[in-house]
Structure formats: structure tokens, C-alpha cells
Image: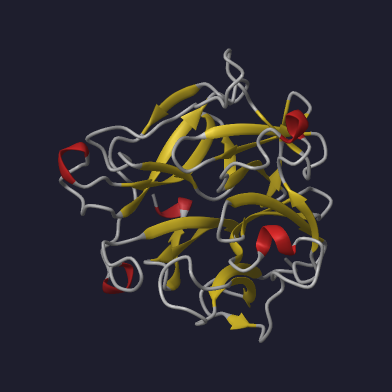
Amino acid sequence: KDGKIVVLYRAEDNSAQGIGKRTSRIGYAESADGVTMKRLDSPVLFPGGDEFESIECPGGCEDPRVAMTEDGLYVMLYTAWNRKTPRLAVATSKDLKNWTKHGLAFEKAYDGRFARIATKSASILTKVKGGKLVIDKVDGKYFMYWGEYAVHAATSDNLTDWYPVLDENNELLKIAKPRNGYFDSQMTECGPPAILTDKGILLFYNGKNKSGAEGDTLYTANSYCAGQALFDAKNPTKLIDRLDKPFYIPESDFEKSGQYPAGTVFIEGLVFHNQKWFLYYGCADSRVAVAVYDPLKK
């Protein structure tokens, strides 16, 4: 935005000990080069004091994934965590600092059938236009991938009310699932916004490795590594191919220490800026880092 990269990051207070027992808020940081960050002193999205307390308190607002429309509306899909059920919620903004909450993403779909189940990690479909990633449509509808124990899909007419895609049995369609013996044997959790490419739709996701024989012994048990899946551009629920080995793994000390010492590179933010790709990710649930891909240095 305005020639800078803005990172919206999940921050936890120290109100209790242990994963899932603190309160999360969304902080704001900006940078001219994508690396050196200046942070605001106060969060820009947080729980409490509004009509959404029942879905956000006491756990908070977690794991934001943000995409932008062509006319400059920012759409955030985040996890509302009341310490009972984690659920996808939606907020929108024109400046990335002042956000309007819209409640649960699946509240209105199918008479609220999927509004009470655990839902996380939404990756809205985008494309590169005018040097930026902007939200795209498929057959006139907005589209997103979501889910952690399988990759699901959903569509929307307005970016705030989403309808999960169902299979022939009227259940949630699973378009990619964990695979025994691979780095994603326990989870296939969607990452940053998906991208339309000339080969199809590219989805970056976070694979969690099972312990024991069901996992990939080349990688640490319970570690998170980053994978890629390719879907058909015209039929985005059709899986074309996916990587058998992760393209990004925990290697540095700061990626293997903190709340997840098994090792975590949890990819969540992706920016196309100055003809380079900036991939922002969480390190063991304790730090934020960035990896940069320069297409001109293939």
C-alpha cells in the first residue's frame, strides 16, 4: 500500500502459559524494503467490546490472511477463537488500520450448517494485475481454499458471506488431503492467498508431518513445512499436481525454537512488490520472518 509492504501479524499477550491459552490480537507493521519493519504500538484488530465477543473471547483474533480487490478494499479472513471452537471470520478495510468486522464467514450458508464447526485458514484466489496481487473470480464468483486437515473450497458473491463447496453426498468437498509417508501426513493447512498462473491456480500450504511410520522420516516429527498444489484454472476444485517434497523447511535456529521446537515455517502472507515475491511466515509460533524470490534471478 502506497509503495510500502504492510504486514498484519498475530501477536499474543502473556496472560497465561501454553499454546492456545493466551489472547491474540492483530498488529500492524510497514516497510519500504519488505524487511525492516516499523510497528504500531496498538493492535488494529482485537477481541472484546463489540457484538463479536462470543466468538472471539477470550482467545482472540488469529492468523490473518489478507487480499485486496482491484478498487482497494482489503479483505481479511482470520480465526475467531473463543477457546471452544476456532472459526473463520471476515473483516474489511480501506486503509489496513481501521477494520470493519462482518462476523463468521459461513454464518449464512446452508442455514448456518457450517457456522458451528471448526474452520480455519482461508486463501482467497488472486491474480497479478498492475504489478499487484488482486482478488480474482471464477465464473463470476469469488473463490477461496480453506481448511487444515484437508483443503476445502468456498465461493462468495460479496467477499463477506461464503458458501462451502459440497460433494455429491452434501458434505464438505475434500480436494486435497494429508498423505501418509509425506511431509503433509497430518495436515494440509492453506497458506497465503492462492495465485492464478498460466499453468493453473497455485496454492501454497502448510504441511504438518506425523510422527512415526505414517510421516516422512526425512523431516522432524510434528514439524511444519511448506508445500505447493496446482489446481485447474477453470475448475479450481480439480487438483492437477502437488509437490511430494516441501519447497521450504525449518532450517534456521529461530525456525526450530520457541513454542514449536519441532520446527515451523508457517507461510501466511504473500506480496508481489517491485517485481519480487515476499513470503512472510511464522517461525515456531514465536517470530515472523520473510523469504524473497526474485524471478529475474532464476
> In the image as oriented, which residue stretches furthest toward the bottom?
41
Give x and y (percent) for residue 216. 20, 42
**Above or below: residue 157 compared with residue 80:** above
**Residue 142 appears in the rendering:** no
- The residue sitting at 30% across, 39% down in the picture is 185
Seen from the viewer's position, the closer of residues 4 and 243 is 243
Give x and y (percent) for residue 175. 49, 26
Seen from the viewer's position, the closer of residues 182 and 203 is 182
* Quadrant housing residue 210: top left
Q: Is residue 242 left or right of residue 107?
A: left
* Quadrant housing residue 245: top left
Give x and y (percent) for residue 252. 27, 69
Q: Is residue 205 left or right of residue 137?
A: left
**Residue 148 appears in the rendering:** yes
**Above or below: residue 125 compared with residue 279:** above
Q: Is residue 195 left or right of residue 187?
A: right
Seen from the viewer's position, the closer of residues 91 and 87 is 87
**Above or below: residue 146 compared with residue 78:** above
